[in-house]
Amino acid sequence: MREVTASGQTVEEAVQSALEQLDTTRDQVEIEIVDEGKKGLLGVFGSKPAIVKVNMPSDPVEQAEEYLKQIIEKMGIPVEVTTEVSGTQVNFNVTGDQIALIIGKRGQTLNAIQYMLHLVINKDRNHYYSVLVDAEGYRERRKETLESLARKMADKSLRLNKEVKLEPMPAFERKIIHHALQDNKQIATSSEGEEPHRYIVIKP
C-alpha cells in the first residue's frame, strides 16, 4: 500500500495534489481528511491549509506475482513468470530450465505454492480470486494422467466388485476424477477423509 499526505488551500486541491503524486485516479484510492483547513480573514490572515491522507491499496494480483517470484528466487531456480487474469481467475505460468524442482513429486511442490498464493491474493479482500499455478503445461499433462487413472480404477472396481481408494489429492484434482467418471452409471465416486488427506473412493 502506498500512502501520501498532501495539503492545499481546499480539500479538493489537497486530494488532487496527492493523486498527482501517486499518478492515479480518485476511484483507485482511499481518502482520509486530516484537516479541512480554513480560509482566514480576507482569505489570507489566519488561514490554514487543508490536509488529506490518500492511500492506494496494492493490487492483489501484482502482490501475489511478486510473492511467487520471491518464493522461487529463494529456491535458487532461475525462471520467468507470466500472469493472465480473466475476471476473478488468475493464472500464473512458470517457465525455466529446472522446472521439475518447482513441480515436485506428483505436483506436490507446485500445489503447495499455489495454496500459498491463494492465501496471499485473498487476504483481507472484498472479493474472491481463484488461483492456478502452472509450470510449462504440467497441469494439462496431470489432468490427462488423472483422467486415465480414473478410468483404470473404475474398471478395477467393477472387475473386483469392490470399492477402490485413491491416494490423497487436493480438491481441484479430485474434481477432475469426479468429472471424468460422472457419465459412468456403473460406478459412484465420493470424497472421504479430512484435508489435506482427503481422497476419492470409487465403487460399483
Image (cartoon, rainbow, N blue to C red):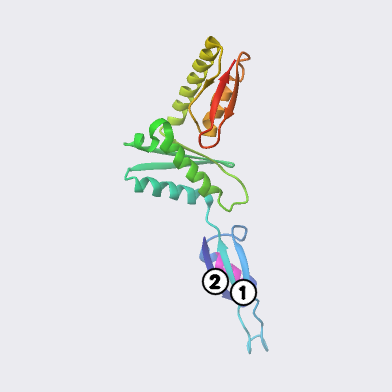
Residue 17 on the magenta span = yes
Mark 2 surroundings within 10 Å by alpha-carbon count, few (fewer than 14), some (14 through 19), many (20 or more): some
**Secondary structure type for disc 2:** strand
Q: Quadrant of the C terminus?
A: top right
**Which residue occupies 56% across, 63% down?**
55
* Residue type highlighted by circle 1: Val
Part of the protein shown in magenta: 13-19
Give the quarter of the image for residue 57: bottom right
* Percent of width and height locating residue 2: 51, 62
Magenta span main SS = helix
Q: Is residue 118 left or right of residue 33?
A: left
* Above/below status of 18 relative to 104: below
| Quadrant of the image occupied by residue 177 | top right
Position in image of residue 181 (x %, y %): 58, 19
Residue type at mark 2 is Thr
What residue do we see at 64% from left, 73% from top?
11
Q: Is residue 174 left or right of residue 142?
A: right
In-image side of 197 versus 11 (left or right): left
Q: Is residue 4 visible?
A: yes
Q: Which residue is mark 2?
A: 5
Q: Are marks 2 and 1 in contact (CB under 8 Å)?
A: yes
What x and y, as percent, mark residue 120?
51, 49
Residue at the image position 54 percent from the left and 26 percent from the top: 200
Q: Which residue is mark 1?
A: 34
